[in-house]
Structures are given as C-alpha cells and as structure tokens.
Amino acid sequence: MSGLLPTSTDASSEQEGDLRTFWLDGEDTGELLSSLSSDTARAILTSLHEDPATASEVAGRVDTSLQNARHHLTNLQEAGLVRVADTRYSQKGREMNVYAPSEEPLVVFVGNEERKTSFLDSLKGLMAAVGVLGLVSYVVQQLVVTDAVQSEVFPRMADGAAGGASGPLVVPPGLVFFAGGLLVLGLALAYRRWQRVSGPTV
C-alpha cells in the first residue's frame, strides 16, 4: 500500500530548455560522468525520463533501498541531470520531493572544444538553411496558387472533377520545392561528410 496521497502533480519529464553541451575533458564533465558511473544511477535517470517520481517510488522501480536511491538522486541533482519538479505529501503529512529530469537536454562531445564549436556552428547553419527553405517554399506556394487562380486553372480542374473526369493527383508546389530543397541539403551534407572521412588524396 502506497504511503503517498493520490494528489495531482505538475511535474513533467519533458525537456523544453536550451541544449547544454559538454566536452569530455571539460571541468564540469567529471562530475557528470561520475554521477552516471553506477548502473543504479543510470536506471534511476532512465526511470525519471519515463515518469517523475519520489525517492521511495524510484527505489521501488529500480529495486534498491530508499537510502541508496536518495544517494544517487542527490548526485544526479548536483550534476544537473535531475531536478525537484514538485512536492507530494505522504499519508502522515510528510512533504516529499518529486524528481524529474533536468529541463535542459545535454550532449557530451568526445574531442576538443574546437571540434565542438565547429559542430554547433554546422548545426546552427543547417537549422537556418531549413528555416530559409521553408520560407521560400511558402512564397513559391503563394505565387503559384495566385497565378493558378488568376488563370482559372483551378476552376477548370473543379469542372472536370464535377463531370466525373479523373485527373492526376495535384501536389502542392510549395511542398515539392521544400522536399527538393531538403534532398539537396542532404546530398550536400553527405558529400561534405564523405570528404572529411576520405581525407585528402595524395
């Protein structure tokens, strides 16, 4: 029988904060990796990503003692991987913390800071390119649709459909443009990756 009152909670396992980045030989990475060195700690963090929980609930999920669960939760919290997202009250009126993953997802880079910066710059450039591509695709869609309406292409298509004539499936031109742009971006990234892997030829 649970010792917690069945109260609602606002705690969530969703991570909506900004991406945090670490590189392997960074000053803060040692504490991070140390907090995850135990199988039990990793199981606890995985469990919290599925659903926030109190220390006693975590202990039951990963089959460990309450004292051990609290120990790992403290380490994970100090490393910035876990946060106290809410509180609940036991049947005896005792306040208990509800733990959830940190709001900021994180990435650990194996390499030096220069390579990490290069990766982030590439990622930001890719996101900017996709954003511009989406904007241009929207403009293309509006221009084509406006031109088609003015030239009465759509009314003629509607008349043909009303008469029972079947025609080809019309795909929005903006979507076609966007898909083609993504394909070009993918091929460009694949070629750049191939150049880095193959290295300079002698």
Image: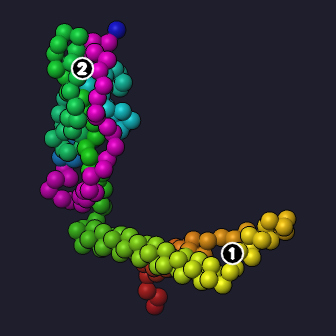
Mark 2 or 1: in front is: 1
Residue type at mark 1 is Phe
Query: In this view, which residue lies farthest toward the bottom?
Result: 202
Q: Residue furthest right?
A: 164
Q: Looking at the picture, how far across and down is residue 123, in whole percent?
A: 36, 69
- The CA span between labels 2 and 1 is 68 Å
Q: Residue at x 24, y 67 (%)?
A: 112
Q: Amino acid at mark 2?
A: Leu
Residue 102, position as x, y percentages in the image: 25, 44
Image height of 16 relative to 199, above or below: above
- The one nearer the camera, 126 or 30, is 126
Residue 171 in view here: yes
Which residue is rendered at x = 25% and y = 32% of the image? Answer: 99
Q: Is residue 198 visible?
A: no
Q: Quadrant of residue 5?
A: top left
Q: Is residue 64 above or below residue 154?
A: above
96 left or right of 125?
Answer: left
Q: Nearer the viewer, residue 23 or 16?
A: 16
Mark 2 surroundings: few (<14), some (14-19) or many (≥20) residues within 10 A:
some
Badges 2 and 1: C-beta atoms under 8 Å apart? no
Query: On the image, numbered disc 2 is attached to which residue?
Result: 66
> Magenta stretch: residue 26 in it?
yes
The magenta-colored residue range is: 2-30
**Rendering colour mode:** rainbow
Q: Which is nearer the eye, 156 or 117?
A: 156
Mark drawn on residue 154: 1
Q: Secondary structure at mark 1?
A: helix
Q: Is residue 114 above or below residue 55?
A: below
> Does residue 199 appear left or right of residue 2 in this picture?
right
